[in-house]
Amino acid sequence: MALIAPRVTAGLPADDAGTLARALRDSNDITVFVDGTVHRLPAQARDAVVDLLARLSRGEAVTVSSVEEMLTTSRAAELAGISHTYLRNMTDRGEIPVEYRGTHRRIRQSAILAWLETQRRKEREAAADGGTHAAGTNDAGSDGVVAGSAVTESAGGSGAADGGAGLR
């Protein structure tokens, strides 16, 4: 199945972002016109469009892509906010499913998004339990995320994240 290439849109200029933010805040009517024709969107599509517009109204850059997009391990690690090495180790352990294209690993974007949601849920549960874990420890287990920080495995004690972030 061929996928459409992701579309990346830079954040709006401040004036345009402010105008859009006011329009979203001041109106409950979300009507879509395409070439002068009114289209009623299903709830999921409407919510996605409103979310896109809200992000643009805050001046954020936005990427629109298919959920089943296949990512390189580098791109998947960047999306997850973890090191490339840590992600490869998770795929080796079977924690995140991986597909091979020749000798190259590819990870479905939906798998990374599901992993991120699992991490957020674990963080919420830990916070609800009192959040007594000390920063810098890996009490969260093999998931590698503690209190919202990306960490790497420290097989040799280095623990350095890709890109020089130096997170532990």
Image: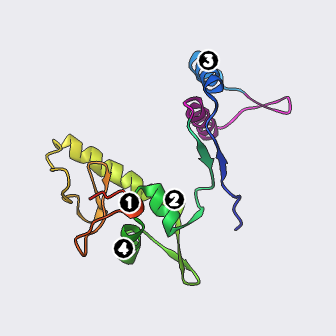
* Residue projecting furthest to the front: 164
> Residue 27's mark?
3
Dot 2 falls on a residue whose secondary structure is: helix
Q: Is residue 4 magenta?
A: no
Q: Is residue 133 left or right of residue 42?
A: left
Mark 2: which amino acid?
Ser
- Mark 1 and mark 2 lie on one chain; the one further toward the N terminus is 2
Mark 4: which amino acid?
Asn
State the CA–CA distance, disc 1 to disc 2. Answer: 27 Å
Residue position marked by numbered label 1 in the rendering: 164
- Mark 4 and mark 2 lie on one chain; the one further toward the N terminus is 4
Toward which corner of the image does residue 155 lie, by quadrant?
A: bottom left
State the CA–CA distance, disc 1 to disc 4. Answer: 19 Å
Residue located at (64% from left, 33% from top): 12
State the CA–CA distance, disc 3 to disc 4. Answer: 48 Å
Mark 3: which amino acid?
Ser
Residue position marked by numbered label 2 in the rendering: 110
Give the x, y percent position of residue 9. Answer: 65, 43
The front one of 33 and 24 is 24
Question: Which residues make up the magenta segment?
Answer: 32-59
Badge 4 density bin: few <14, some 14–19, many ≥20, Cα 10 Å? some
Residue position marked by numbered label 4 in the rendering: 89
- The mark closer to the camera, 1 or 4, is 1
Q: Is residue 46 magenta?
A: yes
Residue located at (36% from left, 54% from top): 118
Q: Is residue 144 left or right of residue 15?
A: left
Badge 3 density bin: few <14, some 14–19, many ≥20, Cα 10 Å? few
Dot 3 falls on a residue whose secondary structure is: loop
Give the x, y percent position of residue 90. Answer: 37, 70
- The mark closer to the camera, 3 or 4, is 4
Dot 4 falls on a residue whose secondary structure is: helix
